[in-house]
Amino acid sequence: MRHPYRKKHDLKYERLFCAVLLWALLLVTMAGCGSFQDVVPEANHLETVPGEEENLIVVGFSQLGSESVWRTANSESIQGALTRENGFFLEFNNARQKQENQIKAIRGFISQRVDYILFSPATESGWETVLQEAKEAGIPVILVDRKASLEDDSLYTAWVGSDMVSEGEKAGIWLEDYLKEEGREEEEINIVVLQGTVGSSAQLERTKGFQNIAREHPNWHILKQEPADFTTAKGKEVMEAFLMTYSDIDVVISQNDDMTFGALQAMEEEGITTGVDGEVILISFDAVREALELVSQGVINVDIECNPEQGAYILEILRKLENGETVDKENIVEEKVFTKENVDEYLETRTY
Ligand code: GYE
């Protein structure tokens, strides 16, 4: 259908078009110079757009951010699996921890008519509308890492990630055993929790899992749970606030390693020691290399692994779908628990 304005070839539209073009050029140039970094979402334009003859499978991936070492490892794992050599063209978009950026990116993928959409939901709620749009466009969606709460589970094809309730329970069970070994199981135990991004499945499920165990111990007192957004800077800030309010903390639970690094800085500044020979028991999640080194040194008591290496799982799912095979709806990655006793044998091979 021809647009009436084209027929008239109105000068007004030409001017408007030129102005928009100039602005776009200016934005692109400034983004390239390092300014506007926070406004222009980072996209993966490292690869050139595939030619028709290449016959690559086009996948749009909305990664929720780059807030943690874990997240970077997760992005790298997926980028390392969905390569041109493996037959894929990956369009990567970093949403900088904002759901609105993810929704925008997903809509972009839909209008580009990609073959598959991958995304790691920043928070659990608020995805129905955009996933309905993907479904209507006939584009299968794979959830990565975190979950989305959806009444209609036909809105996604598969999910790859961790059992984070179980991670929280592992933290509780470890604490239970440790206190017993130390002869402290009858003691009053004061606990503070640094939580991840509010409303994310990582925060909700790790909290729930730990509470499943804590509930059985009336002598465990959770003094405060406070979100610190999975970042080191926030972890430090929140830990400082805990230390100002409470003078008798026995256990710090930090729902990821990056917040643990911040919490450690805050405690060190106050001369508080942690870990195997310290005053405060420190429990962390993720198990990235730098944290495992601290486990090995006895500074962190236990690190509950969350496995970011999901690329191979996703690759297998996409290959099956391409072959017309059915795939499991839930795909849970394998994970361990690291303490001073077992960490060294894994440290050597830790790449992230
Ligand atoms: O623990 C944290 C990250 O969703 C499991 O998000 C993930 C969490 C991970 O930023 O470091």
Image (cartoon, rainbow, N blue to C red):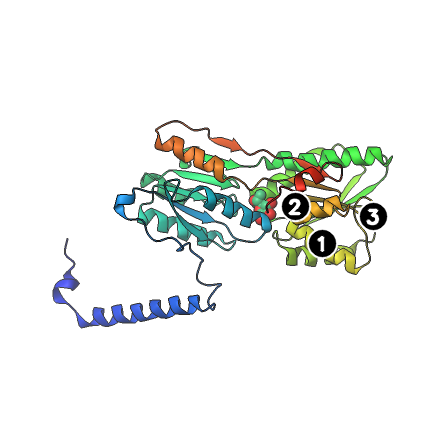
Query: On screen, 41 above or below 218?
Result: below
Picture residue at 42% right of the left edge, 55% below the top: 43
Give the residue pinned by disc 1. Answer: 263
Q: Earlier in the sequence, mark 3 or mark 2?
A: 2
User: Which of 285 and 220 lies nearest the eye of the viewer?
Assistant: 285
Quick check: is the Cβ at mark 1 less than 8 Å away from ligand 1? no
Q: In this view of the protein, which residue sits in the foreground, 210 or 141?
A: 141
Res. 24 visible in picture: yes
Q: Secondary structure at mark 3?
A: loop
The first of marks 1 and 3 along the sequence is 1
Q: CA distance from mark 3 to mark 2?
A: 20 Å
Q: CA distance from mark 1 to mark 3?
A: 14 Å
Q: Secondary structure at mark 1?
A: helix
The residue drawn where x is 50% and y is 55% is 96
Q: Which mark is residue 255?
A: 2
Q: Is residue 339 above or below residue 5?
A: above
Residue 143 percent coordinates (x, y): 47, 40
Please give the residue where the numbered disc 3 appears in the rendered image: 278
| Label 3 lies in ligand 1 vicinity (Cβ under 8 Å) | no
**SS state under label 2:** loop
Frontmost of labels 1 and 3 is: 3
Residue at x 34%, y 53% (from the top left corner): 48
Q: Residue furthest left?
A: 7
Count neighbours of disc 2 (C-alpha within 10 A) and say few if under 14, some if 14 to 19, many if 20 or more.
Answer: many
Label 2 CB sits under 8 Å from any ligand 1 atom:
yes
Three-letter code for the amino acid on which mark 1 is drawn: Ala
Question: Tag 1 or tag 2, which sits nearer the N-term?
Answer: 2
Q: Is residue 198 visible?
A: no
- State the residue lying farthest toward the top: 326
**Residue 126 percent across, percent down from the top left:** 47, 46
Quarter of the view holding residue 152 = top left
Disc ID at residue 110: none
